[in-house]
Structure formats: structure tokens, C-alpha cells
Amino acid sequence: MKLTKVVISGFGGQGIMMMGYALANAVMKDGHQVTLLPAYGAEVRGGSANCTIAISDDEIASPVASAPEFIVVMSTPAFLRFQNYLKSGGTLILNSSLIEGETIREDIKVIPVPAGKWALELGDLRMANCVMLGAFARLTGLVTLKSLEEALVSLFPARKAKLLELNQRALRFGYQTIEKEEK
Amino acid sequence: MKSSANKVLLSGNHALAEAAIRSGCHLYFGYPITPQNEIPEFMSEHLPKLKDGGFVQAESELAAINMVLGAAATGRRVMTTSSSPGISLMQEGISYLAALELPCVIANMVRGGPGLGNIVTSQSDYFQSTRGGGHGDYRTITLAPCTVQEIYDLTQLAFYLADKYRGPVIIQGEGLLGQMSEPVELRELEKKDLPPKDWALTGAKGRPGRMLRSLILEEGVLEEHNWKLNRKYKEIEKREKRSESYRMDDASLAVVAYGSVARIAKGAIKRVREEGLKVGMIRPISLWPFPDEAIRKAAEHVSHFLVMELSCGQMIEDVRMALEGKAEVSFYGRPGGGAIPNPAEFGRVISRNYYQKVRKTR
């Protein structure tokens, strides 16, 4: 794979770091080179959270993205801030259940995913991150659904098997619902 | 598709902690500071479970380094980790560790300074790590990884070198390298023969007592002790210089960079190579002993060296000393604690230097 950079951003507490960790882990399982860089600082719940994932089949020079090819935004502040960073011709995937307003960019592709709404259909808003990640896998083809499901295993301790199952279901739901919409 | 079977995704901080425990370091003393808190967190979770494990969150960095000194005196493998301001506080203890010839590993996940600075990545502690840091005529082996895998490998090497040469070894990490995650193969460093720890304070039952002290008042004895340390440092300089050469075979300009800056520079070199610029890189892995011979040797076919650092220029002094005037040196850097340069920016700087310094002389 050619060097591809992804930024995931939202509120602290939405599971942004979990999305990044699951994605990076899955990409590794798919056999690619990967770096994951969380933004670190005085982070708080409700504050901003973001992380950068670089994917390549070659050595990765910089884990930082100045102009990523893909951006996933889960909140309005993240959308307003990160739309400017996206590479020209890049893809912005946004959580349309929470984000209002239009992009100011005319040179990018915008794909709304109602991750919050779909998570509620599954019974828990907290699944929005995994719903989004499933949709991301289908929309971008950067990662396989199978590897994402496996990656989640390392995120949940054995005693939380039920949560793991729910999150894996959310991944599949996001992936398959986008797939149906495409048809 | 490359195999990922034996790889795990680890942050630099976790890789360092994991490698330390696997190297037999079951004792850890430290005081929290960003951006390296994942190390003590990991140690606090895993060390108390071990039969001979011990973890103490000390009351200060000063206390932590002296706990390290005490534990090292018993011959056990021990580590502390911190970030720039915390490492400054430890310098007294590091000087004592060097004087007493006690093996231990100290990792510095460098952040922006001076003073409390900020928590953003930096390379501004190069002088402190490579010039001894505390008082007295001593040096510390300093290893500078540039990937998470290398953090894992060099941590094991650090414990080995500490035991081999009896002294503190510094791992010069960086905030960025500690925070980022990459796939790591959990491979074991080959265990080579190490000298017996016949100096360790393990209780004198059945043998004459031993003593470790750094106060040496007898006439001529301190001088003799310093000559002994010096012979050891000369031995280290002879055997332990490490560096990586990247595309140096036909290079007419050489970048010299270490740590995170080296990986960004590598990305930049790939770009300018596509435009036909003959640029390579020498990446020091041991900052002390500095790989001066590799640089001097490169000067046989390289007319210009470009030193890149995330500081206003520290390693450049070692590059100049290594070259002894044999080639021209220029510098590009920024103070740490700010924006992290990207390969495009480095590429522009390399191209500019190439056309101004190398091409004009041809």
C-alpha cells in the first residue's frame, strides 16, 4: 500500500483513541507497516481528542500527518478544525448524527455516516465509534473487517466478553449498512 | 504481504517497559512526568506480581535515582525513567552511579526545555546526556532509538552494556517516540557472557566485607580512580560506537541525524533521491560514544554534511569534531517543544543545501 494517512478526531470520551488503536492493530494484522500517534496533552473528557494513523508497505518516515488522505470526524469542533488539514482530493467521513453545517472545502469528498443514529438502533450510543469504524473499513478499503474484529479482542479483557461481542456487532453493522446503501 | 504473526502493536513507552522486564529488570523506581508516564504505569502493574519484583513511586526524582543506586549496589538489574526536567534533578545521583561504577538504565523521554518547558517532543538534552550531565570526569553510554522496535532492542542492549561496563546507561528517547505505537517483534537479544558481579553488596556471610564509596580522600587515590574510569571510557569508545548508514554509497551530501529526526530525514531523502540528488544519511545510534569514525570515513567522498536536529544545534559540535575540518558542515534545526518537521520541509532544506553547497563545487 502507498503511504496513506488517516486522522480520527472527536470529543474526549467518544472512543477516539480506541478507534485509532483498533485501526492500527487491524492494519498490522493485515500485514502492513503502521504508526499510531495520539495527540497528547492535558486531555480531558469532553475536550478534543485526535490521533493519526499512517499506513504503508514501506518504512514510515513521519508519524505526523500534515495533509492526511482521510479524516474521520465525530464532533462539530473536530469537523471545523480538521476539514482544513485534509489533502486536496481527500475524503472526509463525518458523524452526521452530531455534526451540523457544511464544509467550506470544494476540493474534497464528504461522506456522511449517521454513526450515532445507527448506534442507537443497536441499543447503545457508545457504540458509535465502532459503527463508524466498520463504515470506514467499507468506504476506504484500507482495512479488512475481519482484522478489525480481531483487533478488538486485544482491547477488551476476558471478563468483558459481552462488551467485545457488542462492539464487534457494531463494526459489522456499520460495514454492512454502508454496503447496502451503496447498492 | 509481510508477515505480522509475531508482532504486537506497542507504544514506545510500553515497548521500553516490556523490554526492561524481559531483560530481568524487576526493580523500578520513578516519579511521574509526561510524556513517559505509561512506563511507570506498566511497571506498577507488572512488577509487584513477580516474586522478586519491586515498584516504588518515589517522593521525588532525587529519591528515585538514589533508590536506583541502592538497588544497583546489590547487583540487581534496575531502571528509572523520566523526562527532561526530571532527568536534570537526577544528575547528582547519576554522577554518584558513575563514580561507584553501578550498572543501571535511565531512560529520558525528552520534552521541550529549558526549565519545565512543555510536554512536546524535543532533542534538546543531547549535551546533558553525552557530556556526563552531572559533576566530575565521567561519561554515560547513550543510545538513541528511532523506531519503537529499536526502543525495544536497545533497551535490552542497554542492560547488557550497563552490566558489561559497570555504569549507568542512558536511553535517549523522545516524547514522540514514547507516545507513538508501531508493530514490534518481541525478539530476544543474544545473551553474551557478562562479568560476575563480585562487587555487589549481598551480605558478607562467609566472605570478607565489601564497600562502595565515592568519597576518596587518600592522597593520589582519587586520581587513580579517575584514570581507571578513563581507561574504561576509552575501551567503550573503542568497542561500542554504533551508527546506521543509509544510501551513503554514492552520496555527495550526507545528512547526520538521530532519533525521530532521522526517520523524518529518511523520508525526505527518499523524495530528493527520486529527483536524482545524491544524498545519504549517517544516523548515530550511540550518541556517546559518538560514531566519529563513520563520519570521518564518509568525508572521503562527501564534501558537505548537513546536521539536522530538533534543537538549535548540539550534535553538530560532535560532527564538526569528528570531521576535523575535512568537510563543510551546515545545520538545520528548530528548538524542541514546537512543531514537528515533516519530510516535505526537510526535503526542501536538503535540496537547497545540495544545490548551493554540493553542485556549485562540481
Image: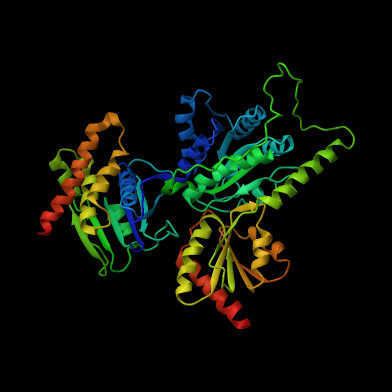
Q: Is residue A8 left or right of residue A132?
A: right
* Residue B13 drawn at (x, y percent): 48, 42
* Residue B216 drawn at (x, y percent): 82, 33
Q: Is residue B290 left or right of residue B113?
A: right
* Observer-nearest of A90 and A103: A90
Colour basis: rainbow
* Observer-nearest of A47 and A131: A131
Query: Which residue, as the protein is rendered here, is positioned at the far top?
Result: B205
* Observer-nearest of B155 and B30: B155
* Residue B272 drawn at (x, y percent): 48, 73
Number of numbered discs overlaid on the protein picture: 0
Q: Is residue A119 left or right of residue A30?
A: left
* Residue B340 drawn at (x, y percent): 48, 58
Query: Which residue, as the protein is rendered here, is positioned at the far front?
Result: B193
- The answer to whether residue B131 is visible is no
Residue at point 67%, 29% (across, down): B73
Location of the C terminus of chain A (image quadrant): bottom left
Q: Is residue B226 left or right of residue B238?
A: right
